[in-house]
Amino acid sequence: MPAELAGPALPASEPRRRPDRHSLMDTAEIEVFLVLAEELHFGRTAERLRLPQPRVSRLVAALERRAGGALFERTSRRVRLTPLGQQLASQLRPAYAQLTAALDDARAAARQAAGVVRIGFSPTSNMTVLTRLTEDFEARQPGSRAVGPEDGDLAPLPVEHMQQEAWDRGVADDGDEQTL
């Protein structure tokens, strides 16, 4: 693992401890808890999360075991947060929002190419095809730019020169895109 992802190093005198499996919360437990805290109804929570109602009940029970107390007061007619449930909900909401935002950002970054794609092509390349390829690429990848050999200009080069340079793509005389 790269050092920047590993987090701060522990002093040699402090060995890494594995978290107690009873203290780890599953994101499904957190999500079910927060939705139930909002809905205050097991059936609506199950519908909203597209889960079977028994699964919602099991996840809430597991979280209550981890928390060490009841998070909800339940009767046949109503569901209410206990003071412990209110405290946990108020602390979990911002943390869960940060987790989901971080994952959303990571997904967006994974889908988004960014940077410069250098393209080399010969004087006899089909410029219509090249123009279409670069415009399509830049439209689909707004954080990216397709450039040619001369300071970003899309100007032709002899094929020999293209093979000597580090180009990401080349366009052959017949207009077919090729990796060089």
Image (spheres, rainbow, N blue to C red):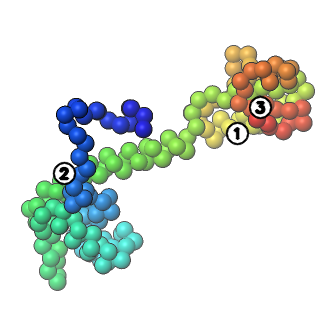
Amino acid type at mark 1: Asp
- Marks 3 and 2 sit apart, C-alpha to C-alpha, by 54 Å
Asked if 71 appears above or below 24 in the picture, the reply is: below
- Of the 4 image quadrants, the one containing the N terminus is top left
Left/right placement of residue 132 relative to residue 75 reads right
Q: Is residue 30 visible?
A: yes
Instruction: State the residue in front, 33 or 127.
Output: 33
Q: Residue at x 57, y 33 (%)?
A: 114
Asked if 175 appears above or below 89 in the picture, the reply is: above
The residue to which callout 2 is attached is 91
User: Residue 98, image x and y in percent?
Assistant: 31, 46
For label 3, the SS is loop
The residue to which callout 1 is attached is 136
Q: Is residue 126 visible?
A: no
User: Residue 69, image x and y in percent?
Assistant: 11, 66
For label 1, the SS is helix
| Number of other residues with Cα within 10 Å of mark 2, as a class: few under 14, some 14 to 19, many 20 or more | few
- Of the 4 image quadrants, the one containing the C terminus is top right
Residue 180 is marked as 3
Q: Reading the chain from its start, which is encountered first: label 1 or label 2?
A: 2
**Mark 1 vs mark 2: in front:** 2
Toward which corner of the image does residue 102 lie, by quadrant?
top left
Toward which corner of the image does residue 131 lie, by quadrant?
top right
Asked if 139 appears above or below 87 in the picture, the reply is: above
Q: Residue at x 41, y 48 (%)?
A: 103
| Number of other residues with Cα within 10 Å of mark 3, as a class: few under 14, some 14 to 19, many 20 or more | some
Q: Residue at x 23, y 68 (%)?
A: 62
